[in-house]
Image (spheres, rainbow, N blue to C red):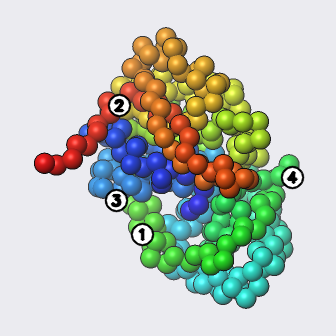
Amino acid sequence: MKWAGGKRQLLPVLRRFYPGQFNRYWEPFLGSAAVFFDLHARGLVGGGATLTDHNPDLIACYRAVRDFPDEIVRELIRLADDHERKGADHYYEIRNNRFNKERALLRASANGGDLGYSPALAAMFIYLNRTGYNGLFRLNSAGEFNVPAGRYSKPRICDDENIRLVSAALGRSDVALEQGRFTTVLERARPGDFLYFDPPYAPLSKTARFTNYTAEGFSLGDQETLRTVLVELANRGCHVVMSNSTAPEIAALYERNLQVSAAGLRCHRVPARRAINSNAERRGTVDEYVITNVSETIARPSS
């Protein structure tokens, strides 16, 4: 999955903060799930994992990939063939006439409960993700997906091998996919567990607001609540890692805060490449925070 703020490019840095040993793994802002899949590939999630996101569509899509990989591959092949013939016209046809309409009916029938994506709807979600502008998932005030088509000459819409690998990783009996807020980890995480938090970033500029991955957005109040969660978990004896922007409001929450430092949380500024900006020339390297109570391990070159 392409996802705003996805951590695939930051993995070499984040690996330096993986604890040497841990029990269960928790990822409350799942997004592209880059860290979970990295840990899984390295055989580091022996204690199981709970993967959560507030976005019900994202969780519904992952569940469908887990349960119906072959059906989704077949649907994606059809979507890819039609996209090759019709391009952006096909994108808007799927977005407006199928995805948003079928999604609205599903939300109405779910009546506030979990969404149960069909393989066809999950394939449409993946198709729009792979061909929409920068992989954004954005909802308007009516709760409709409204991301415009991206400008890709040959987007890879159906990666059947990857879909089956993702299905196998998510299909483990000790892996749970849940829709909910990040605060739910306080009720269940235990000492020795490892939790990675990747919240919607506080914007570095007034125009860089890519926080509406749900209709509700993510406010400064949510960032303050998140700090409280991190401090409590660190004091509980959990291994905690969070990435965030170095926006002034985030620096004010963590730098020189007595509760943060008393919990053993330290702020590391690390270089990261930003892939999303309306101006392509501004997509470059910026500093981000890794805030954690895990001691950094820097691999040394072998002699």
Q: Disc 2 vs disc 1: Cβ atoms closer than 8 Å?
A: no
Give the residue at mark 2: 294
**Which is more N-terminal, label 4 or label 2?**
4
**Which is more N-terminal, label 1 or label 3?**
3
Circle 1: element type:
helix
Give the residue at mark 3: 41
Q: Is residue 43 left or right of residue 146?
A: left
| Vertical comparison of 9 with 251: above or below | below
Give the residue at mark 4: 142
Residue 197 image point, x, y percent = 51, 39
Q: Disc 3 vs disc 1: Cβ atoms closer than 8 Å?
A: no
Label 2, label 4: how many angstroms apart (C-alpha)?
42 Å
**Which is more N-terminal, label 3 or label 4?**
3
Label 1, label 4: how many angstroms apart (C-alpha)?
35 Å
Q: Residue at x 60, y 19 (%)?
A: 252
Q: Residues within 10 Å of mark 1 (few under 14, many from 20)?
A: some
Circle 3: element type:
helix
Give the residue at mark 1: 165
**Which is more N-terminal, label 1 or label 2?**
1
Q: Mark 1 is on which residue type?
A: Leu
